[in-house]
Image: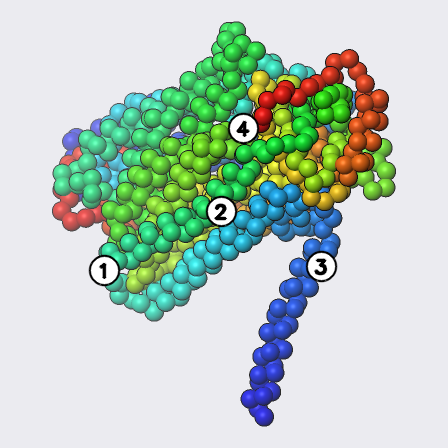
């Protein structure tokens, strides 16, 4: 009878130990709105692109467990050594200064850990760098202190616009301070979008955390990256390279909509942003 | 044996002449420690300003600061404040690296203890030593002046980060003379360190006492040898890099300007070719100090001496071929990113060997938890934390998520503000009795440790969360979602400030109480040569060279 009670207690404790953190985590996940930072968030944002999901998996399932283990292991050793070998407990120090097998182990095991990390690491890297065939290509230019976008004519575009931070005085309910802009960049969901990134003046960087995307905008250089957004919504990014006094004031907003809505928006945008110098074509080469 | 009465003890210089024209490695070491402390305090005040601003969303204090410090017009105060924040982050980085960590660790402890530890009477080139110090002083003056002249149009000071990439640092972004002052400051600081490196290498190779082979010298001396080689090899690259920026800005060249066929990326490669070894230059002397302290207070020789020495050598060599891991988002080729990822990860191996060897040194020892040892044990833990986030960032694929965000800021502050600074304090308390002749108060020294330990962990641990959440670095203001961890981070500064006050008081108290430390306050574990001399040592020591029989490491 006693044993049954003990087992029940243990099971109950175990259940609680699993359920409570799980609920908290689930709570965290529910609290997260895609595309924007979670207030008081502890971890990576919810990702909406394959690259972003790959990054999340690599960090949460490979890197974090390994580094957490190493930190706790070293801490544990330090605590143990300090406790066991303090001068009261161990007045006579040993003279041991070598142990070749130990030295081999603590060289080999880190090497193996690093090899283990490098496999998913390099796989994810290739996915990030090798731009697949894109259905939409957008040219993004960093300026002091705003982003501008050009949609090519032969993809239904032929216009360009600037994306300016909405001043605090103009924020509407639902807008985000320092993140909301006047003109959102609209793209179709579930299609590969290639972005060609450059700068008009100093170095900026185009970064959208929930896409897993970050690429420098360098004058005189055209960088390329890509994303495929798998969920409709509004996604915020910021400038990720110091570019002067308003470095914190040039956000990025990308809205992912269905292909139909995207075509409608293209037509409207063409009229809204029509100007002589925004006729951009995508060259007919492959990527 | 040391004797100050040998060789017809001539009067040593006094007063201004003693310090202005010093050729004594101990006095010059003291000058460096004082300069480094001043640089560190100013760097700390700048960081206090930044954390105060970042405590709450919105811009609260920098516009007022710009009006007060720079005489900015109230109508321009917000813009001037934003620029001033960028100037603060820039000068904070420059001061902490070039005018706090390097002067104290290399110029201070290196100059003081390398000659003594190898049984030499002084450095190989005592007058060169003097000019190294005063060049650094001049450099600091120029760096401070830069804050008060025009940088960006209508703004004072250069605010492009300590890495000062063009075009923000060229005439495109910073037409005013502030950046030119920074460049000239770097020329002088670079020259100071190159000359110092020549001095250290020559001293260590040529002036070891009879019987002290390279494999018998203390690990602190090894750390200084590797550091000196790194300085000698990479500072000229920085010099070339900043000189080309100077000519781009003032003499019409186009090295970094695409309009003239140049490339902003050339700057980044040159800067980081220097910049990455630079961070190893900052930490390696710290590694040497920790080895000495762990050994002394465990009353055991360091575990695996050769492994430790050659781990430092390999960290130096490897650290010189991984620079582009600072450039993963510039649009580098896939193969280049692959190489730099793998090469950077390899550095974790010798570093891990060192961490495990320090623990193995403590294992079986008879550990005394005096203040230097407490700092050293703290170092081992916090440097490990910084090192493992470094392994995360080494991966180009993961770095795409973290580049130029707060995760990187957390990483390098854990290795620097926690790692290098803890090693610095450890060395400070270890050698304070030797340098001054007075013993510090254990209570104050340990209070210093705990306040700083709590403080910097509260400041920097939440910054991992901010980085994971996507907060960019070098930002004066942030979206409201980042408010919680910014407030927590800023609150840690209370403890950091208190720890600094305790540190000052500990120094004053030791000089007031005048408890004599004696030649060796640390007991049997202190086996290096400085503990055979009086505290403080005579003005000239080892005028008769000691003969080294056993290992004195």
Query: What is the C-alpha distance between the residues marked 4 and 2?
Result: 22 Å
Query: What is the C-alpha distance between the residues marked 3 and 4?
Result: 37 Å
Quadrant in which residue A224 is drawn: top right
**SS of the residue under disc 4:** loop
Q: Badge 1: few (under 14), some or many (20 or more) residues near its Cα, within 10 Å?
A: some
- State how the image is colored: rainbow
Which of pointers 1 and 2 indicates the residue nearer the eye?
A: 2
Q: Are marks 2 and 3 on the same chain?
A: yes
- Per the image, the residue denoted by label 3 is A27
Which of pointers 4 and 2 indicates the residue nearer the eye?
A: 2
Q: Nearer the viewer, residue A260 or B137?
A: A260
Q: Badge 3: few (under 14), some or many (20 or more) residues near its Cα, within 10 Å?
A: few
Residue displayed at 31% across by 30% down: B229
Position of the C terminus of chain A, as image quadrant, is top right
Vertical placement of residue B38 versus A91, above or below? above
- Per the image, the residue denoted by label 4 is B330
- Per the image, the residue denoted by label 1 is A95
Pointer 4 chain: B
- Per the image, the residue denoted by label 2 is A120
Q: Nearer the viewer, residue B509 or B232?
A: B232
**SS of the residue under disc 2:** helix
Pointer 3 chain: A
């Amino acid at each position: 009878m006693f044993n049954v009670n003990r087992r029940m207690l243990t099971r109950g404790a175990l259940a609680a130990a699993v359920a409570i953190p799980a609920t908290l985590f689930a709570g965290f996940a529910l609290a997260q709105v895609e595309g924007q930072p979670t207030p008081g968030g502890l971890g990576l944002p919810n990702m909406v692109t394959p690259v972003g999901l790959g990054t999340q998996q690599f960090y949460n399932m490979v890197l974090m467990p390994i580094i957490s283990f190493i930190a706790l292991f070293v801490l544990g050793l330090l605590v143990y050594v300090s406790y066991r070998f303090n001068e009261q407990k161990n007045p006579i120090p040993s003279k041991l200064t070598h142990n070749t097998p130990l030295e081999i182990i603590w060289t080999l095991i880190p090497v193996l850990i690093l090899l283990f990390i490098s496999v998913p690491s390099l796989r994810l890297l290739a996915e990030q760098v090798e731009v697949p065939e894109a259905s939409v290509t957008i040219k993004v230019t960093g300026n002091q202190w705003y982003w501008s976008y050009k949609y090519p004519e032969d993809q239904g575009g032929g216009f360009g616009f600037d994306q300016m931070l909405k001043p605090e005085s103009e924020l509407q309910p639902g807008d985000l301070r320092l993140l909301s802009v006047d003109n959102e960049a609209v793209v179709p969901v579930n299609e590969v979008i290639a972005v060609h990134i450059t700068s008009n003046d100093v170095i900026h960087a185009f970064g959208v955390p929930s896409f897993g995307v970050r690429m420098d905008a360098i004058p005189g250089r055209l960088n390329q990256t890509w994303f495929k957004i798998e969920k409709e919504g509004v996604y915020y990014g910021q400038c990720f390279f110091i570019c002067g006094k308003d470095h914190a004031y040039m956000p990025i907003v990308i809205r992912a909509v269905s292909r139909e809505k995207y075509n409608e928006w293209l037509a409207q945008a063409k009229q809204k942003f029509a100007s002589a110098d925004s006729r951009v074509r995508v060259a007919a080469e492959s990527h | 044996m040391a004797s100050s009465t040998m060789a017809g003890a001539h009067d040593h210089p006094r007063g201004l002449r003693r310090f202005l024209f010093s050729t004594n490695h101990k006095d010059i070491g003291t000058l460096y420690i004082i300069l480094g402390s001043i640089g560190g305090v100013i760097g700390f005040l700048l960081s206090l300003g930044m954390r105060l601003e970042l405590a709450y969303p919105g811009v609260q204090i920098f516009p007022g600061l710009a009006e007060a410090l720079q005489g900015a017009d109230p109508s321009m105060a917000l813009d001037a404040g934003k620029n001033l924040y960028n100037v603060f982050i820039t000068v904070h980085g420059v001061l902490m690296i070039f005018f706090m960590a390097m002067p104290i660790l290399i110029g201070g402890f290196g100059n003081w203890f390398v000659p003594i530890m190898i049984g030499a009477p002084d450095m190989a080139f005592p007058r060169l030593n003097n000019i190294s110090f005063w060049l650094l002083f001049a450099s600091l003056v120029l760096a401070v002046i830069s804050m008060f002249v025009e940088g960006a149009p209508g703004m004072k000071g250069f605010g492009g980060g300590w890495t000062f990439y063009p075009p923000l640092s060229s005439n495109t972004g910073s037409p005013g003379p502030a950046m030119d002052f920074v460049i000239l400051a770097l020329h002088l600081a670079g020259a100071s360190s190159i000359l110092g490196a020549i001095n250290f290498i020559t001293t260590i190779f040529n002036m070891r006492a009879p019987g002290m082979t390279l494999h018998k010298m203390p690990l602190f001396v090894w750390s200084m040898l590797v550091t000196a080689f790194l300085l000698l090899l990479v500072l000229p690259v920085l010099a070339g890099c900043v000189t080309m920026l100077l000519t781009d800005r003032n003499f019409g060249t186009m090295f970094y300007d695409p309009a003239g066929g140049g490339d902003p990326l050339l700057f980044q490669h040159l800067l980081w070719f220097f910049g990455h070894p630079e961070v190893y230059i900052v930490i390696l002397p710290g590694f040497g100090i920790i080895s000495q302290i762990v050994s002394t207070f465990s009353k055991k020789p360091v575990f695996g001496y050769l492994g430790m020495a050659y781990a430092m050598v390999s960290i130096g060599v490897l650290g010189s071929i991984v620079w582009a891991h600072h450039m993963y988002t510039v649009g580098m080729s896939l193969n280049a990113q692959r190489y730099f990822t793998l090469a950077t990860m390899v550095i974790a191996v010798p570093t891990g060997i060192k961490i495990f060897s320090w623990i193995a040194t403590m294992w079986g020892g008879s550990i005394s938890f005096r203040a230097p040892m407490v700092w050293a044990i703290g170092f081992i833990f916090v440097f490990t934390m910084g090192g493992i986030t470094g392994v995360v960032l080494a991966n180009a694929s993961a770095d795409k998520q973290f580049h130029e965000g707060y995760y990187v800021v957390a990483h390098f502050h854990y290795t620097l503000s926690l790692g290098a600074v803890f090693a610095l304090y450890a060395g400070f308390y270890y050698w304070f009795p030797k340098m001054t002749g007075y013993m510090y108060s254990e209570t104050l020294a340990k209070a210093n440790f705990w306040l700083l330990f709590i403080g910097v962990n509260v400041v920097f641990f939440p910054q991992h969360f901010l980085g994971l959440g996507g907060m960019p670095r070098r930002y004066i203001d942030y979206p409201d979602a980042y408010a919680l961890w910014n407030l927590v981070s800023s609150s840690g500064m209370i403890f950091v400030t208190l720890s600094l006050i305790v540190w000052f008081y500990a120094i004053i108290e030791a000089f007031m109480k005048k408890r004599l430390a004696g030649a060796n306050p640390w007991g049997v574990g202190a086996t290096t040569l400085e503990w055979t001399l009086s505290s403080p040592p005579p003005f000239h020591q080892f005028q008769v060279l000691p003969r080294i029989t056993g290992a004195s490491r």
